[in-house]
Image (spheres, coloured by chain):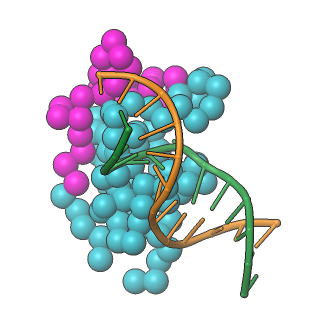
Chain colours: A cyan, B green, C orange
Amino acid sequence: MEKSVYQRIYNTIKQIPSGRVASYGQIARLVSNCTPRMVGYALAATPSELNIPWHRVINSQGKISPRSSGEDTMLQQKLLESEGIVFDINGSADFQKFGWKSTISIK
DNA sequence: CGGCTGACTCTGG
DNA sequence: TCCAGAGCCAGCC
């Protein structure tokens, strides 16, 4: 498979079912030769045309990555809540309940 | 070819 | 428990 890491990352994220969330580290470990930075950068460059559920990808703390003013972050949280994800008063999601069961494997 | 960048994660203090 | 620093690697000038 000569696909770029980005493509593999996108493919992996697309496997995330609705109502589930995955962390950057989780994705990074699923994808070979991939680091959390790659995932973050890949997601930052994710073209919406691919219909990637980028909002389902959060950091290891179970929180939304604060990358900008905050409106985008709130939008992401709203999207997650719309799928059934519940955030506590700290604004973090429960990985033990909503954590994606990564049953796939990239080779 | 060389250097900069990035929505993270981990370890130490 | 919280804060700060280093590491990592592909992609794009």
Inspect the magenta stretch and tell me whether residue A101 lies in it: yes
Task: List x then y, in percent, for residue A43.
Answer: 52, 51
Q: Is residue B6 above or below residue A38?
A: above
User: Depth check: A92 or A103 in front?
Assistant: A92
Image coords of residue A39 (percent x, y): 46, 55
Quadrant housing the N terminus of chain A = bottom left
Residue A46 visible in this rendered orientation of the protein: no
> What's the residue at 31%, 61% (across, down)?
A29
Quarter of the rendering containing residue A98? top left
Residue situated in front as seen by the camera: A26 or A16: A26
Foreground of the two, A72 or B6: B6
Which residue range is magenta in the image? A74-102
Residue A87 against residue A45 in the figure, above or below = above
Location of residue A32 in the rendering, given as x and y in whole percent from the top left corner: 35, 71
- Residue drawn at point x = 30 percent, y = 70 percent: A106
**Residue closest to the eye, B10 or A91:** B10
Can residue A36 be seen in this snapshot? yes
| Number of marks present in the image shown | 0
The residue located at (33%, 33%) in the rendering is A62
Image point (60%, 23%), residue name: A71
The C terminus of chain A: image quadrant = bottom left
- Toward which corner of the image does residue A45 lie, by quadrant? bottom right
Image x and y of residue A65, in percent: 48, 35
Q: Is residue A52 above or below residue C12?
A: above
Q: Please give left or right for residue A68 compared with residue C6 in the image.
A: right
Residue A97 shown left or right of residue A23 in the figure: left
